[in-house]
């Protein structure tokens, strides 16, 4: 029985893909450079541009980085990007969400940061896309970019509450 449980845990970790970091427990560090960056990245467009120029994609299948760790390491997966972007946007008074997308016939998932401006916009591991009417439109667009079909998606607010 223990072997079966151990195998289940290992398989779950290997197939889990991108997770969602719970920002509600994150405490902003007292780092002048990080605090200045929060103020500087005062629009979703600036956040996406900054991530494109300064971060590199690196899969972290077993853990999620908080925004400060990601800022320091400068390497992370889609969850790390979405967590960083959501955190920065919230600090600058934007409504922002993390969206986790699950695919049919694919064991991995994907995370996005979505912003509510006059319309919905999002970042997808660096790039900034704009002017969508709904979050579902964003999920459709991003999934088509990946040549996949989504089976479901979950929208989380800053406190990790499911809102859609």
Image: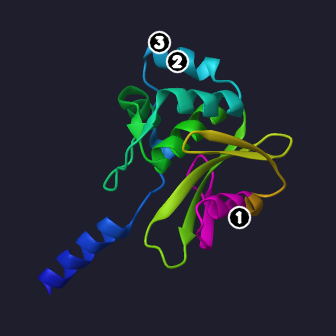
The residue positioned 68% from the left and 61% from the top of the image is: 139
Is residue 164 visible to the viewer in this orientation of the structure?
A: no
Query: Label 3 near label 1: C-beta < 8 Å?
Result: no
- Residue lying at the far bottom of the rendered structure: 1
Q: Name the element at disc 2.
A: helix
Q: Position of residue 112 (x, y in %)?
A: 59, 51
In screen coordinates, is 113 left or right of 12? right
Tell me the CA gap for discs 2 and 3. 5 Å
- Disc ID at residue 140: 1
Q: Which mark is residue 35?
A: 2
Q: Position of residue 4 (x, y in %)?
A: 18, 84
- Disc 3 element: helix
> Is residue 113 visible in this depiction of the protein?
yes
Q: Residue at x 46, y 42 (%)?
A: 25
Q: Is residue 7 left or right of residue 14?
A: left
SS for callout 1: helix
Residue at the spot 33% in from the left edge and 51% down from the top edge? 63
The residue range painted magenta reads 138-164
Q: CA distance from mark 1 to mark 3?
A: 39 Å
Give the position of the C terminus as an image quadrant. Answer: bottom right
Residue 122: image tag: none
User: Along the horizontal axis of the image, is 41 left or right of 11?
Assistant: right
Are the two marked residues, 2 and 3, in contact with CB atoms closer than 8 angstroms? yes
At which x and y percent is residue 70? 41, 34
Residue bearing mark 3: 32
Examine the structure image and report whether residue 60 is included in the region drawn in magenta. no
Q: Is residue 136 above or below residue 66?
A: below
Q: Nearer the viewer, mark 2 or mark 1?
A: 1
């Amino acid at each position: 029985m223990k072997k079966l449980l151990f195998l289940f845990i290992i398989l779950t970790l290997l197939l889990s893909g991108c997770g969602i970091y719970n920002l509600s427990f994150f405490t902003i560090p007292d780092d002048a450079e990080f605090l200045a960056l929060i103020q500087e990245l005062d629009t979703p467009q600036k956040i996406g541009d900054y991530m494109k120029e300064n971060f590199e994609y690196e899969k972290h299948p077993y853990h999620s980085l908080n925004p400060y760790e990601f800022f320091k390491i400068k390497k992370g997966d889609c969850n790390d990007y979405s967590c960083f972007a959501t955190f920065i946007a919230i600090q600058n008074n934007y409504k922002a969400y993390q969206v986790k997308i699950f695919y049919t016939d694919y064991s991995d998932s994907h995370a996005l940061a979505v912003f509510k401006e006059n319309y919905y916009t999002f970042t997808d591991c660096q790039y900034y896309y704009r002017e969508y009417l709904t979050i579902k439109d964003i999920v459709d667009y991003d999934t088509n970019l990946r040549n996949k079909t989504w089976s479901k998606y979950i929208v989380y607010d800053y406190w990790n509450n499911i809102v859609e």
